[in-house]
Image (cartoon, grey):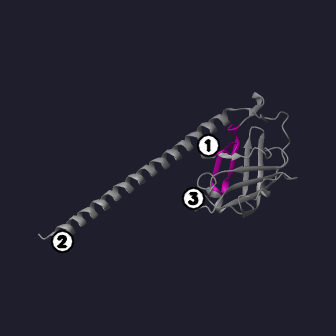
Amino acid sequence: MNPRGRAGKKQRRTGALTIQGAFYFFLGAGILALGYAGYIIADTHAYQAVEQSKFESLSQSEGPHPLIEGSAIGEVKVPRLGLNAIFVQGDSPRILRHAVGHISETALPGEQGNVVLTAHRDSFFRPLRNIRPGDAITIETLGGEYNYQVDWTEVVLPSDAQVLKPSSENTLTLVTCFPFYYVGPAPQRFIVRAHQIVQLQEPPAIAQTRLHL
């Protein structure tokens, strides 16, 4: 075989090995990514199950419960969308990995003002892509049940803090990233605003109190 033929054969063999190596690399990366995603999902479901059990076992008769970063406040439900999740105090990345977060500077359910909840668009708040005006939202806490009706939705920039401002009425604001199917950090925020439609009598004892550490 002449030198040119041997060189061509060697190049083809090298090319085949390179393709094979790339195939196994991407296959391994895909398996690791799927494994990690599975772990995150399982971890999230386990956290929600534990917090759900804790929440259901608590009773208002047990007296006030200090509200600290990461402590469960209640459940948020959007029946038409099948959304049902525990929400906790705070909105750190660790909290939002496991639950819906309550932005600490905003009102608590049962207080007058604007209750703001936030969650990732690819987890708990993914169903919000199909929400519409008139939908019912229920907040359940140890202090009672609060019912809301969606007024509007809007897409805003992350720098728009208007949606976090206090309200003279009892309102609920849900915040998540937008677009819902965007790859990477999303450039906008999707906002759902609702008003409370049932004013419940304030319980004689507040089930949870703020504790600033």
Relative image position of residue 209 (x, y in whole percent): 79, 35
Relative image position of residue 105 (x, y in whole percent): 78, 45
Q: Which amino acid type is shown beneath numbered disc 3? A: Gly
Mark-to-mark CA distance, 3 and 1: 18 Å
Magenta stretch: residue 105 in it? no
Relative image position of residue 173 (x, y in whole percent): 75, 54
Of all residues, the one furthest to the top in this rendering is 62
Judge the density around disc 1: few (<14), some (14-19), many (≥20) Cα neighbours within 10 Å. few
Q: Residue at x 51, y 44 (%)?
A: 42
Q: Residue 24's quadrant in the figure?
A: bottom left
Write down the region rendered in magenta.
Answer: 69-95
Q: To which residue does mark 1 refer?
A: 94
Q: Which mark is residue 4?
A: 2
Contact check, label 3 and label 1, Cβ < 8 Å? no
Mark-to-mark CA distance, 3 and 2: 48 Å
Q: Which amino acid type is shown beneath numbered disc 1? A: Arg
On screen, residue 177 above or below 92: below
Camera-nearest label, 1 or 2: 2
